[in-house]
Image (spheres, rainbow, N blue to C red):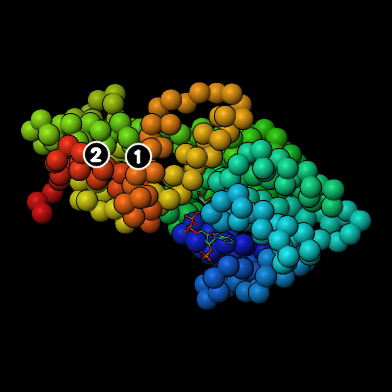
Amino acid sequence: MRVAFLGLGIMGHAMATNLAKAGHEVTVWNRTPGKMVEGAGIAPTPAAAAQGAEVVWMCVSDTAAVEKLLFGPEGVEQSLAEGGSSNVIIADSSTISPSATVKFAERLRAKGVDYVDAPMTGSKIGAANGTLIFMVGGDDAVIQRLNPLFAAMGKKIFRMGETGKGQATKLAMNLQIALIFEGFAEALTLATKLGVDPKQLVSLIEATMVRSGVVEYKAPFVLQRDFTPNFPLRLMHKDILLTLEAAKEARVKLPALETVEEIYDLATEEGQQDLDYAATLTLLEKWAGVLVKGEAA
Ligand code: NA7
C-alpha cells in the first residue's frame, strides 16, 4: 500500500521501518529533518507526504502535534481533494485525547476521509520487533483494509468500537501501568528501608500472585538503575494528564492517579522528563533516604 508515515520518534521510526521492510511504498515526514527510514522516501511537509497516499499513519507526541499535522498550514488536510472523494484512511498511533480524536475524525469525514485511532502497547522493543498490540477504534470495514499494515507492525489488534474508543482504551491501560509501577516502586523503597534485599523481593513477587507484566518488564532495569528511556517519563506524564482530563469530562474520580500525577510533576521539576518513567522511583528514594540496588555497584 502507499503509506505516508508522519513522526519518526522512538516508536514511529521502528514502525515505518517495518512497513517499508514488508514491501509497502512508504514516504516519511518528521518535524526535525534528518531522520530517515531505509527503503522509504522523504517528504518536506505532512501535506506532501500525504499526496497520493492511500493511508496516512501518524505517530507523534500529543494532541496538539496531531492537530498541527492534520490541520496546520502544511497539514494533511491541504492534500485532500475537494468534494469528498479522496477515499484516504488516516490512522493515528499517537496517544492523544479521545474527545479530540472524535472531533478530528468528524472534520475529516466531511472530506471523504476515514479515521482510525490505533494507539499501541509493546514499547520500543515491540515496535522494533513488529510485535506491537494495537487497540483500535473505527469502522470495521476500514480497519480491515488496514490489516496488511497492522500485520507488518504488530502481532495483534483489538477492536474497541467506533473512532475514539482506541484512545479511551489506551488511557485505561496506561492508568494501570502508572499505578502498578508506582506500587512496585513504593514496595521496593519501603522494603529497602526496612532492610530487605530488593532483588529477593523481586524474586518473591515473580513467584506469587503479585507478579505482573509491568514488574517483570521493569524490574531488571530498575535493579540495575538503568533509566534510559523505553517509555519516557514526559510521555507517561502526558498520558496521566490526558487520563485525568478524560475522567473529568466523564465525571469520573481517579484519586490514586491524581496522587501519582503529583510525583510525575515533581520528577519533571527535577529535570527527569527525558528519563524512563521508572525514574520516578528516585523521588521515593530521596524522601526515604535509601537507594534501591539489586546488583553490585
Ligand atoms: P518520541 O520518541 O518522543 O517522538 C515524538 C515524535 O513526535 C517525534 O517524531 C517528534 O518530532 C514528533 N513531534 C513532537 N511534537 C511535534 C509537533 N508539535 N509537530 C510535529 N511533530 C511533533 O515519542 P514516541 O515515538 O516514543 O511516542 C510517540 C507517540 O506514541 C506518543 O503519543 C506516545 O505516547 C505513544 P521531532 O523529531 O521531535 O521533531
Q: CA distance from mark 1 to mark 2?
A: 9 Å
Local crowd at mark 1 within 10 Å, few (<14), some, or many (≥20)?
A: some
Whether residue 18 is visible to the viewer of this picture, yes or no, is no
Q: Residue at x 54, y 70 (%)?
A: 32
Residue 109 in the image: above or below residue 197: below
Viewer-proximal residue among 64 and 105:
64
Q: Position of residue 265 (x, y in %)?
A: 39, 44
Task: Identify the residue shown where x is 43% and y is 54%.
Answer: 124
Asked if disc 1 and disc 2 are in contact, CB closer than 8 Å, the reply is yes
The three-letter code of the residue at mark 1 reads Ile
Q: Position of residue 156 (x, y in %)?
A: 54, 42
The answer to whether 43 is drawn above or below residue 212 in the figure is below
Q: Quadrant of the C terminus?
A: bottom left
Q: Which residue is mark 1?
A: 263
The answer to whether any part of residue 295 appears in the image is: yes
Q: Mark 1 or mark 2: name the one nearer the start of the chain.
A: 1
| Residue type at the position of mark 2 | Leu
Please tell me in which quadrant of the rendered image residue 7 appears.
bottom right
Q: Quadrant of residue 137?
A: top right
Judging by the rendered image, the residue that carries numbered circle 2 is 284
Depth order, front residue of 130/279 = 279
**Residue 295 location in percent, x, y?**
13, 49
Element under label 1?
helix
As drawn, is 280 to the left or to the right of 49?
left
Residue occupying image coordinates x 88% and y 53%: 84
Residue 108, above or below 193: below
